[in-house]
Each structure stands twice: as structure tokens, then as C-alpha cells.
Image (spheres, grey):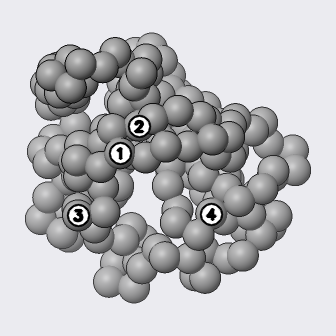
Amino acid sequence: MKLTETKYDNKETGCCAKLDEARWDNQEFVWKDKSFAKDHIREFLHFPLNFGSVMARDHAAIEQAQAYAAEPLWLVDEISPWGADVYMATDRAVPDMPMEYLSGTFMTKVFTGPYRDIGSWIAQMETLVKEKGLELEKLYFFYATCPKCAKHFGKNQVVAFANVR
């Protein structure tokens, strides 16, 4: 499967698709062994240094393996100020790439604003999870658009994925 054969409609920019807020905001997803190709990006104080080149390399490998998930999704785990793990959804294993299989219940929330607001978004997700009487296990972010496309759309949108129990 090629990216053009998925639900990812990037015709407007030729790069990132416009985020379907209704699809991602205040939703709950239950995954059992959802497959993701895993990679790592270098960061300086959480500012990505090689995100574009990592994404290009990963897209090429996933397309070569014809392993795109029907609904493209990439999650970022901000593991330190110096780096983050990125997970790209696939429909099967991708040769020569580490794979991760995520399971659990994930609550989502769409945030709009500059990336520097991430601390506030984390706090809001922690509160949302507690209000529902759940415990936050892990928090991932889906950076839906690159800075160039965010400018084109007039807003930067990020989806937080809270793995809860």
C-alpha cells in the first residue's frame, strides 16, 4: 500500500493533510498489538533537529514494504530534552526497522497553538485523565502538521494520546 492509497488527503499542501478534528478530539481508542515502526529523532531542549530526515527515511521504508496503515498516524514519545522516539503506524512489520506493538486504551485531545505550550497540554491531559478516574501510563503526541503546513492552515494542531488504565 502506498501513502496515496490511504485516508491521508494531502492534496491541498502536497505535504501534510488537514487534521480532521472530529476524528481525533475527545476520542477513545482501544488497541491490541497495533503495529508501529519505531525510530528516534535528535532534539535540543525538545526542539527536533532531524525530524524531517527521519520521517522521510521512515516513509521510504514503509512505502517500500507497502506497509502503510489505512489511516496514517505517527506518535512521538518525548523521552528527554535531547531526543524522542517516533512511532509510525503500519499494517505489518517493516524490514530493517525496529517494530513496537502498542496495546491499551488511549484517550485523545486536540490542542491548537505553538509547540512551546506542550507543558500546558501535558497538564491538561493529566487533569482530564484524573477527572475520568483513570491513571496515566504514557503520553504520546501526534504532531499533525509540519511548521510550513501549520502556517498554510493558519493553526498548529497536536493530538495528545494518553495511554490510560
Mark pair 4, 2: CA separation: 18 Å
- Of callouts 4 and 1, the N-terminal one: 1
Residue 165 higher or lower than 154, as above or below: above
Q: Which residue is mark 4?
A: 69
Q: Quadrant of residue 159?
A: top left
Can you give x and y, in whole percent of width and height, for residue 122 in the image? 23, 24
Q: Secondary structure at mark 4?
A: loop
- Residue 22: image location, x then y, percent: 23, 64
Q: Is residue 136 visible?
A: yes
Mark in the foreground, 4 or 2: 2
Disc 1: CA contacts within 10 A as few (<14), some (14-19) or many (>=20): some
Instruction: Answer with mark 3 or mark 4, whichever residue precedes in sequence.
Output: 3
Between marks 3 and 2, how big is the CA–CA gap? 16 Å
Side of 146 where 76 appears, left or right: right
Amino acid type of the residue tagged 4 in the rendering:
Ala
For label 2, the residue is: 106
- Quadrant (top left, top right, bottom left, bottom right) of the N terminus: bottom right
